[in-house]
Image (cartoon, rainbow, N blue to C red):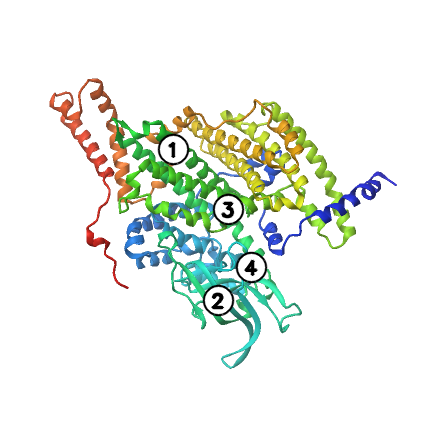
């Protein structure tokens, strides 16, 4: 007996049987979700030894000439047409003029290829459009986002038949059809398998002809665009009790296109999600009959709805809400920095107080990080990947940082942000936070189950192959496949343990860094260190917890946080390189890196403290978190450096928060920007007056210390600041409620 045969008989086979019994049984829904999409940079991080050379293939994102023309033309124009106060409080909807403009200029067909009449935009261009519009109006941004994310368009492009694509895509691209997609129902929120919406294969007379089709009954809610949609993408459970299309009676979740003007469809009523004005509402169907060719992909895709949805979501989830979140983070940083500079209390700009600087520093860091991650993720999407785990990371962490940023901005603006009215540029963003946190996978679910739960299987270099082998109905073939991978897995784990320990005890000083990265090389070395630590801790958690890890959601959430921080910091370092390695931007990079490393260590420590096998936690802590080599959050000085970037005009500030204002036409924000520019422009003159011991510029002017022109400049700055500080008020009659 040779070594391989002996190993298989005495080692692999017993291990295979034991692992097969211990492996948790995944539901079909869970298995399909895990298998959806691709892996990308998350797989490099899960390996514990990321190959930085692969980043060379990731080109910096950029708009094509056609995409730039669209941004400078239709996007800038529609931004000027939007008034968020009127949309939200006066009309409760976009104007008819805006709706028509969006249709005519192809906003609903950005992802649809040009051959079908769409714009055929890249993921980055799609993201840029959403980002730009969301600064002006959340309702408009959501209206544009939804048809270009998870919906009939994406599903048809991936899975539709040729006939379906030829008919529907041109109509969707030119706005002739307004789509919506209905998955969520009262019984089934995150748990799609619990849906009670049904479709039954049957025959019905249609215009005197016996037609084979589906009798649909559904009750959905929270469906964006459903009140105005003309075609519904419907998820339901498909049944064939009479065996009209085969022997299987329960076919599973399927997706069909349903015109909303069919008899039995009830739509038009609206929800009011956090006082936001985008169209959202319930939609129901009672005995709605559609032909079999309404199934997206035809009969071949019957029962394949869940993997279809997960595949469609894998890309869209990484674009829509992360783009909105990036805009919100930049908007919050921009407005807060400007306001903290012009608002004076106790004789100083409030941005000079350390309590405010703490918030400003975090705002600057979040703005830099989320925008970096948005660009990096778009770059991966443009390579053709549909990275489901990365998209989940982006949805979760971009919206969480948006929540943090808007809350910080509200704190800094104080009463200015509390009083609603046309001059309040933060209030509606604040109200919209729960919407972003909840949709496209609630953040609690995404953090505790998806990021690490899915990532551990999909992105791990060996685990997916092992799971497939263990689930093989042919035990002999399963053992063969298991034997081919399990020993490679073991060698990989031992190597990672040695790497993680060595780099932890040397603080990563001797780890490899890519060539040409300059001042951020130490951060790359630390990323190597923490990637190895993450891989080792993940292996031990999977080994000691086995199938029960699925139920240890707090542990899974913490490990997911580590994976996310590794990904987000990679994006930060890549952004610094892509933008030209400006030394003046290093405080932002440093802030993000120090915050990420501190978070990583804290999460790893929490995991090790809570491993049920206590000895494993003790040993791992000694290996990967040795005493005296602990990361700390950004210092007060590092935070102040980032805060100061927002308080003064500079190229760094422009790179951080400037680009979002191209084409922006908000009176309240323009007043803020003008006051910021005027005040910082006359600051040297104010300093000179102060050093001369004069009370204010009026006294200086009266004494002849400044010229008339200088006095006029100071007066203009003072008036501009006063205009910004003002808040709205209303006549008593403005609060009258019209009777129903």
User: Against 272, is 267 above or below?
Assistant: below
Camera-side residue: 129 or 333?
333
Q: Which mark is residue 359?
A: 1
Instruction: Answer yes or no: is residue 258 visible.
Output: yes
Which of disc 2 and disc 4 is earlier in sequence? 4
- Give the distance between the C-alpha atoms of the residues marked 4 and 3, in whole angstroms: 19 Å
Residue furthest out toward the top: 692
Q: Which one is in front, 186 or 402?
A: 186
Which one is in front in this view, the residue at disc 2 or the one at disc 3?
3
Residue marked by disc 2:
258
The residue at which mark 3 appears reads as 444
Circle 4 Cα neighbour tier, 10 Å, few/some/many (<14 / 14–19 / ≥20): few
Q: Give neighbour class at mark 1: few <14, some 14-19, many 20+ (Cα, 10 Å).
A: many
- Image spot of residue 202 (x, y percent): 57, 74
485 in relation to 525, above or below = below
Residue position marked by numbered label 4 in the rendering: 194
């Amino acid at each position: 007996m040779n070594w391989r045969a002996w190993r298989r008989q005495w080692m692999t086979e017993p291990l295979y049987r034991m692992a097969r019994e211990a492996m948790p049984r995944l539901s079909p829904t869970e298995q399909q979700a895990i298998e959806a999409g691709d892996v990308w940079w998350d797989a490099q991080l899960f390996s514990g030894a990321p190959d930085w050379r692969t980043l060379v293939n990731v080109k910096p994102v950029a708009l094509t000439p056609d995409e730039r023309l669209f941004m400078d033309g239709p996007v800038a124009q529609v931004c000027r047409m939007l008034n968020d106060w009127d949309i939200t409080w006066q009309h409760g909807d976009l104007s008819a003029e805006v709706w028509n403009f969006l249709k005519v200029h192809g906003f609903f067909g950005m992802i649809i290829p040009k051959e079908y009449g769409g714009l055929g935009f890249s993921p980055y261009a799609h993201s840029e459009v959403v980002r730009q519009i969301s600064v002006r109006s959340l309702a408009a941004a959501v209206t544009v986002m939804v048809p270009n994310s998870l919906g009939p368009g994406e599903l048809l492009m991936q899975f539709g038949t040729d006939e379906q694509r030829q008919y529907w895509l041109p109509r969707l691209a030119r706005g002739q059809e307004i789509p919506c997609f209905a998955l969520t129902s009262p019984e089934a929120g995150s748990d799609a398998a619990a849906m009670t919406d049904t479709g039954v294969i049957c025959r019905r007379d249609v215009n005197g002809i016996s037609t084979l089709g589906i009798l649909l009954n559904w009750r959905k809610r929270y469906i964006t665009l459903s009140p105005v949609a003309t075609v519904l993408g419907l998820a339901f459970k498909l049944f064939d009790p009479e065996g009209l299309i085969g022997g299987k009676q329960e076919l599973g979740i399927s997706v069909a296109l349903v015109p909303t003007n069919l008899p039995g469809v009830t739509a038009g009523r609206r929800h009011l999600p956090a006082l936001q004005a985008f169209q959202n509402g319930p939609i129901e169907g009672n005995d709605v009959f559609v032909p079999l060719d309404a199934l997206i992909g035809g009969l071949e895709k019957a029962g394949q709805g869940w993997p279809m949805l997960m595949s469609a979501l894998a890309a869209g989830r990484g674009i829509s809400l992360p783009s909105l979140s990036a805009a919100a983070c930049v908007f919050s940083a921009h407005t807060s920095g400007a306001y903290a500079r012009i608002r004076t209390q106790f004789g100083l700009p409030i941005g000079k107080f350390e309590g405010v600087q703490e918030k400003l520093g975090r705002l600057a860091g979040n703005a830099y990080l989320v925008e970096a991650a948005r660009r990096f993720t778009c770059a991966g999407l443009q390579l053709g990947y549909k990275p489901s785990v990365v998209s989940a990371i982006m949805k979760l962490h971009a919206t969480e940082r948006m929540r943090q940023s808007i809350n910080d901005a509200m704190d800094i603006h104080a009463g200015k942000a509390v009083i609603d009215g046309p001059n309040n540029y933060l209030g509606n963003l604040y109200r919209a936070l729960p919407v972003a946190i909840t949709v496209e996978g609630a953040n609690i679910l995404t953090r505790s189950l998806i990021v690490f739960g899915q990532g551990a299987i999909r992105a791990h270099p060996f685990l997916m192959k092992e799971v497939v082998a263990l689930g093989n109905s042919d035990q002999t073939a399963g053992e063969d496949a298991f034997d081919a991978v399990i020993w490679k897995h073991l060698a990989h784990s031992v190597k990672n343990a040695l790497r993680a320990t060595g780099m932890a005890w040397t603080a990563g000083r001797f780890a490899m860094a890519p060539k040409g990265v300059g001042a951020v090389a130490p951060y790359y070395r630390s990323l190597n260190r923490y990637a190895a630590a993450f891989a080792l801790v993940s292996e031990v958690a999977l080994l000691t917890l086995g199938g029960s890890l699925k139920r240890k959601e707090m542990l899974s959430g913490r490990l997911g946080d580590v994976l996310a921080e590794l990904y987000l910091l990679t994006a930060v370092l890549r952004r610094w390189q892509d933008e030209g390695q400006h030394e003046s931007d290093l405080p932002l990079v440093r802030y993000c890196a120090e915050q990420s490393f501190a978070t990583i260590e804290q999460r790893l420590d929490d995991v090790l403290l809570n491993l049920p096998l206590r000895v494993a936690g003790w040993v791992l802590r000694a290996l990967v978190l040795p005493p005296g080599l602990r990361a700390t959050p950004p210092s007060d000085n590092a935070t102040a450096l980032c805060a100061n970037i927002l308080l003064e005009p500079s190229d760094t500030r422009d790179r951080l928060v400037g680009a979002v204002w191209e084409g922006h036409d908000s009176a309240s924000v323009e007043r803020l920007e003008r006051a910021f520019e005027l005040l910082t422009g006359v600051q040297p003159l104010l300093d000179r007056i102060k050093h001369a011991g004069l009370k204010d510029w009026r006294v200086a002017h009266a004494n002849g210390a400044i010229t008339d022109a200088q006095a006029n400049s100071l007066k203009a700055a003072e008036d501009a600041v006063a205009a910004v500080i003002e808040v709205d008020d209303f006549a008593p009659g403005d609060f009258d409620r019209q009777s129903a």
